[in-house]
Amino acid sequence: MSAAPKPKSNTVKAQDTLREMIFAGDLLPGSTYLEAELAELLGMSRTPVREAALRLEAQGLLEVRPRHGVRITPIAPSDMEEIYEILTELEGLCAEKAADAGHSEEEVQALEEAIRHMDEALEAENREAWAAADEEFHSALIRLGHNKRVEAICAMYNDQVRRARAVTLWLRPLPTESNEAHRAVCEAIRNCDAERAGQLHRAHRREARKLLTELLKRHGLRHV
Amino acid sequence: MSAAPKPKSNTVKAQDTLREMIFAGDLLPGSTYLEAELAELLGMSRTPVREAALRLEAQGLLEVRPRHGVRITPIAPSDMEEIYEILTELEGLCAEKAADAGHSEEEVQALEEAIRHMDEALEAENREAWAAADEEFHSALIRLGHNKRVEAICAMYNDQVRRARAVTLWLRPLPTESNEAHRAVCEAIRNCDAERAGQLHRAHRREARKLLTELLKRHGLRHV
DNA sequence: GCATCCCCCAATGCATACATAGCCTATGGC
DNA sequence: GCCATAGGCTATGTATGCATTGGGGGATGC
């Protein structure tokens, strides 16, 4: 059972592959690609490629432009600001709900484990491990919110800013104070202090937003 | 120029028509329909219908179930709660931003005009006019937030709960106190009191959510 | 030399045809 | 009589072909 035998449909394969290619930078943000081009690249006909493109468009990773193929959506600093505003509010909501709803012990432990991973990564100065642990924390927090739609929205926007974060990860100082912020949020949740959890988390997110958008602007990155 | 000459593509026509049919109740929530069935209904082949279905799925109006056709998404009270939580946060954000960013005079006037329409509708006890004015207020508020992505999310979820609101509109008491709440939010925005604007609006939305979900539950509407 | 208009072509929009997979039913065996 | 299995049928998944459309390029006129 190491690898589930995936009888994936071509549409799903196309979707996954294109997604990966966008993250990996094989498809350049701002460029447009022809359907036939992508179809050949993936070794299938245009039909499943079109369907995959429609689904990816819904996730904001690319735009289907009638008669002009697909354009990989570039993320500008202003887009980052919009997205971070949304993530701030929705994750803040999750933090509040996590604190005053009955949070199960194991869910909170997921938070604490993520924090431990972040500490370890920081110790080792392993930025990529830290980024992974950071994502782990945020996704665990969102799960604590018990709102499937919020989970979907946040997952989508985290996808969209993935490229940007991959860049800024190496431009920013080591995120030592970020761990403290996470710890404080976690503690507020444990203490069932909803208001404090929400406020702490929002403040943390706003801080991150400021840091990242200023980094992008300072390095003259008009878009990624 | 009375009617713009629409050279609409079949995909767009299918999307618009299906959307209308869902709102009108011609397609029953919870039911599934075959692609061929819908294609014949719309007088076109399956291809544009499939594309329209994919786009509508992204908007949450229906689900494409592999090998099982499309299912019109039913909205249960629990779904309403999820959606209202999101709208509460995002509109609250917009109220805050509207208050402390430089709001243009005409944008605030749009709010006040919507409130006037609500007053008039209430005076005439015209529930449908009131609902239209209520939507007008919320959409004007969201526009004041200056965040395109928030606008898109709110528009999408307002679509999803449209059916539910159409039902509850006739079951609830005349929303007299709702107008007061809107007026208070508007005033806070005028006074550039971001915190108060946000809090007032969130409280208003939470009230609305409680009212609607209780109505649905009391009338035993498992879904609409 | 520049701007405008028209024509041709390429890429998409759409339809149709075929392959495939899942489900229902019927039949046979226990 | 009931359960299990096999086969067929139906609806989707995918490919392919053709018509359409919109844009780019070339040519012509000012």
Image (spheres, coloured by chain):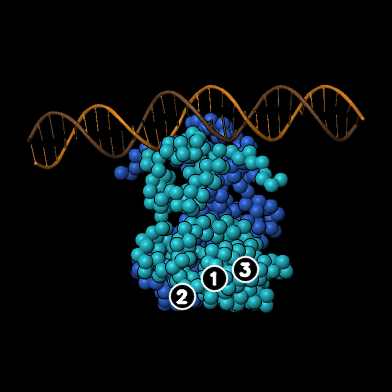
Chain colours: A blue, B cyan, C brown, D orange
> Which label lies toward us, 2 or 3?
3
Q: Which of B168 and B195 lies nearest the eye of the viewer? A: B168
Tell me if residue D21 comes above or below residue A103 in the rendering: above
- The answer, for residue B58, to whether it is visible in the render is no
Q: Which mark is residue A194?
A: 2
The subunit carrying tag 3 is B
The subunit carrying tag 2 is A
Label 1 belongs to which residue?
B125
Q: Position of residue A93 (x, y in %)?
A: 49, 68
Tell me if A140 is positioned left or right of B191 in this view. Answer: left
Q: Give the residue drawn at x 57%, y 34%.
A: A35
Q: Give the residue drawn at x 37%, y 62%.
A: B221
Dots 1, 3 in contact, CB < 8 A:
no
Q: Where is residue A89 in the image (x, y as percent from the top left)?
A: 54, 66
Dots 2, 1 in contact, CB < 8 A:
no
Instruction: Give the residue type at disc 3.
Output: His
Q: Which of A2 and A9 lies nearest the eye of the viewer? A: A9
Q: Give the residue drawn at x 54%, y 63%.
A: B128
Q: Position of residue A189 (x, y in %)?
A: 43, 73
Q: How crowded is mark 2: few (under 14 residues within 10 Å), some or many (20 or more)?
A: many
> Which label lies toward us, 1 or 3?
1
Tell me if B106 is positioned left or right of C25 in this view. Answer: right
Q: Residues within 10 Å of mark 3 (few under 14, many from 20)?
A: many
Q: Residue B117 carries which label?
A: 3
Instruction: Give the residue type at disc 2.
Output: Ala
Tell me if B176 is positioned left or right of A214 in this view. Answer: left
